[in-house]
Image (cartoon, grey):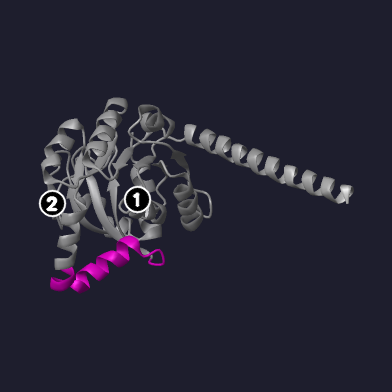
Amino acid sequence: GLGAVALFQSTLTALVVHGTVGHAWRRRRMRSRVAAMEGHVVVAGVGSTGLHAVEELVATGTPFVAVDRDAAKLERISQTLTGGAMLFVCGDATEDHVLKDAGIERASGLIAALTHDKDNLYVTLSARTFNAKARIVTKVVELEAVPKMTRAGANSTVSPNIMGGRRMASEVARPELLELLDGMLRDRDSSIRLEEVPIPKGSVWVSRSVAEIGFQQSTHVLLVAVRDGTRQIKYNPAQDAVLGPDSVLVVLGHDGDVAALRRLVAASAV
């Protein structure tokens, strides 16, 4: 009897120690991976809005780090969406050290999706302070908060209420178009994508016309639009349209063709 009790106690102790040590090791390994990241997206808040942002980032293969105060929620989302591979930081995103732990200083973008406007405003201001170049997209509940978010450093604001209302109206007015766009943007099994491809500075494509590049012949993608450095958009650009510095191409094509275009554009930089 004493031997059985001793065996039970030793086994229980081993399980507890192994679980604690294993959990600490996983967290330490995750912190190391986050510290090595660069050019990723930080998602502040994975509630009803942030969760969908995370799903989209996973679907598009965009590297990101999620931040939330609920550790159990983060673990559950990680297991559901990525099989436990999602990188995250457990903490309050309104605290500067938490944003730094998520690598905000090295990030290419931030999605502020907390519940309250005042919290998103604080996160936006802190993120812009730490990273002047990151693209910051901020959720707003009250429209009065939009100018405040912009002054704090947000590049773009999104109102779930407005977007939801517009989506509902579009579902009635043009359902086929929405289904087509959703398939291209979100269907993981679809090989056709609508993507944006930035032209890097120093590219030999700058100052060349659409005809000279010959998109469909050389890249097998359809050029839908071009946005120049002044953020003006030319839809269905003419063959004599000239690409300017910091242009962004919006193209439609198969995954492999779009990837080939990205490599071609990167190789064109001098």
Crowd tier of the residue under label 2, counting other residues whose Cα lies within 10 Å: few below 14, some 14–19, many 20 or above: some
Residue linked to disc 2:
234
Residue 156, placed above or below residue 251? above
Gap between marks 1 and 2, in whole Å? 36 Å
Q: Amino acid at mark 1?
A: Gly
| Foreground disc of the pair 1, 2 | 1
Crowd tier of the residue under label 1, counting other residues whose Cα lies within 10 Å: few below 14, some 14–19, many 20 or above: some
Q: Which of 200 and 159 lies nearest the eye of the viewer?
A: 159
Residue 217, placed above or below residue 151? below
Left or right for 33, reference 261: right
* Label 2: element kind: strand
Residue 27, located in which quarter of the rendered image? Answer: top right
Q: Which residues are magenta?
A: 170-190
Q: Is residue 177 magenta?
A: yes
Q: Amino acid at mark 2?
A: Lys
Which percent across, then down, holds residue 130?
32, 26
Which percent across, then down, holds residue 108?
34, 37
Residue at figure coordinates x 37%, y 58% from the top left: 257
Q: Earlier in the sequence, mark 1 or mark 2?
A: 1
